[in-house]
Amino acid sequence: MRAADDFPAEDETATMTDAELAAHLAEVAGKILIEVRESGMFEGKSLGKAGDETANQFLCHALRQQRPDDGLLSEEEKDNATRLGMERVWIVDPVDGTREYGEKRTDWAVHVALCVNGKPEIGAVALPGLDLVLRSDAPIDIPPAAAKPRMVVSRTRPAAEAVSVAETIGADLVGMGSAGAKAMAVVRGEAEIYLHTGGQYEWDSAAPAAVALAHGLHASRVDGSPLTYNQAATYMPDLLICRPEWAERVLDEVARLAK
């Protein structure tokens, strides 16, 4: 098994744009995670921990080498408050969907995003189990919408609000793992709506939101307000990523439920 130090990111990425760097790092981190899992050295929770630590080491080292003047926020790294005074902040999630990663499923992801003045400007979401990277600088063609909308929700604990909205608008529920996998299901045309009200953190949605917005999709809080990152409190209670034609209807239904 190769360690993160075996990937000379500082050499390979010296001339890359921010978007190219994000995609490269997400892809390589995904390959590292696959190798950690296939090594046979870890199982269960220890596999998730080893994957998180190894991918985090690689991502944070590479970003500090390549973008030393930028801020950094990672799920697996101790937060540094100096990022709050920076315009450019990288937000990463080394393994989004640790349970799915440990269970050797494909619905887990690696997130790398660059937020500028709080906005998710650049992002890459790797789906290593599918050997796929979705990126903000290389939008793909989104397939036509299904006649009946599909809403991706947590496969283990779907939020009550999402279930209620799905019933009201006549959407089929599709259970899926990580936030990144669910958001990319909308980008890939496997669903029309991703509504989440169960609580997340900035690293769960920064990269998916950047990719979704670059593909012309709607991405906001469930009250319709913009997604704002690099906040002192990294908790983000809710998220809506969907095809634009469904945004108003879903937001209206969420507002109705909140009354």
Image (cartoon, helix red, strand yellow):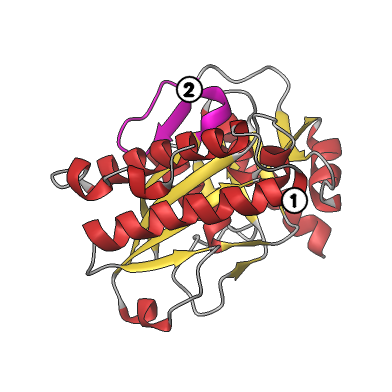
Three-letter residue code for mark 1: Lys
Which of the two discs, 1 and 2, sits closer to the camera? 1
For label 1, the SS is: helix
When asked about the image quadrant of residue 224, the answer is bottom right
For label 2, the SS is: loop
- Counting from the top left corner in percent of width and height, residue 179 is at 63, 45
Residue 243 horizontal side relative to residue 80, left or right: right
Magenta span covers which residues?
127-142
Q: Earlier in the sequence, mark 1 or mark 2?
A: 1
- Counting from the top left corner in percent of width and height, residue 117 is at 33, 68
Residue topped by disc 2 = 142
Residue topped by disc 1 = 45
106 up-or-down from 68: above or below: above
What distance separates the C-alpha of mark 1 from that of mark 2? 36 Å
The answer, for residue 220, to whether it is visible in the render is no
Nearer to me, 122 or 35: 35
Instruction: Give the residue displayed 40% in from the left and 53% down from the top.
Output: 59
Nearer to me, 158 or 147: 158
Three-letter residue code for mark 2: Ile
As drawn, the residue found furthest toward the left would be 15
